[in-house]
Amino acid sequence: MHSDQYLVSAVLSGNRAALQEFIKRHERLVSHMVARLVNDKSDREELCQDIFLRAYEKLGEFNFQSKLSTWLATIAYRHGVNHLRKRKMKWVNLPEDAEDWNFVEPINLERNLEEDDLEKIILENLEHLPPQYKIVLSLYHLEAMNYAEIGETTDMPEGTVKNYLFRARNLLKERVTKYLGSEELI
């Protein structure tokens, strides 16, 4: 696997195989970002294509002051948010009082479920969270970004990222706990 610097240089010099490698290397990240914001499958596919086209157009401006994945995630995030705004979809603004919160560790359900079943339940319930919560959870847990990288990607202060992550985990835990409780009644 080539380094990001080599890959960017090769793409900029017109190497089609490098462009394919660039897309393949980052398609999971872009699709996670878009899927957490946009529900319609055809919109998601179109947005992903638009994001890679935009990244290709702007690649010459990338200066390696951040990781390539963070730069691309920022493009994907902003493109997805702009899509929501154009569609006038709900984007919840929450207070930025993260300093007043105690941050918790990831969800720990004391349940004897198969790991795949629990993952499926969590992912299903994740889709019902507000978009900014889905983004922060996805970037932190699925893309292994730290608070600073998430803040850079979403243009949110680090305290807001921590706050959203805390709230998202709690909401997700409530939803999953309710889901599991209702499943027991069946």
Image (cartoon, rainbow, N blue to C red):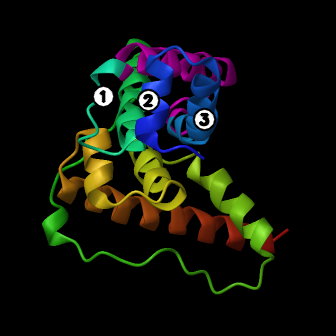
Q: Is residue 168 left or right of residue 64?
A: right
Q: Nearer the viewer, residue 55 or 180?
A: 55
Secondary structure found at label 1: loop
Above or below residue 182? Residue 86 is above
Secondary structure found at label 2: helix
Q: Is residue 37 magenta?
A: yes
Rounded to the nearest angstrom, the CA distance separating label 2 from label 1 is 9 Å
What amino acid is found at the position of numbered circle 1 in the picture?
Phe
User: Which residue is disc 1 drawn over?
Assistant: 62
Residues rendered magenta in the picture: 34-59
Secondary structure found at label 3: helix
Q: How would you classify the magenta stretch by its main secondary structure?
A: helix
> If you read the primary sequence from the N terminus, does the residue marked by circle 1 or circle 3 appear first?
3
Above or below residue 143? Residue 37 is above
Q: Quadrant of residue 161?
A: bottom left
User: Which residue is disc 2 drawn over?
Assistant: 8
Which class describes the residues within 10 Å of circle 2: few (<14), some (14-19), or many (20+)? many
Q: Nearer the viewer, residue 81 or 151?
A: 151
What amino acid is found at the position of numbered circle 3 in the picture?
Glu
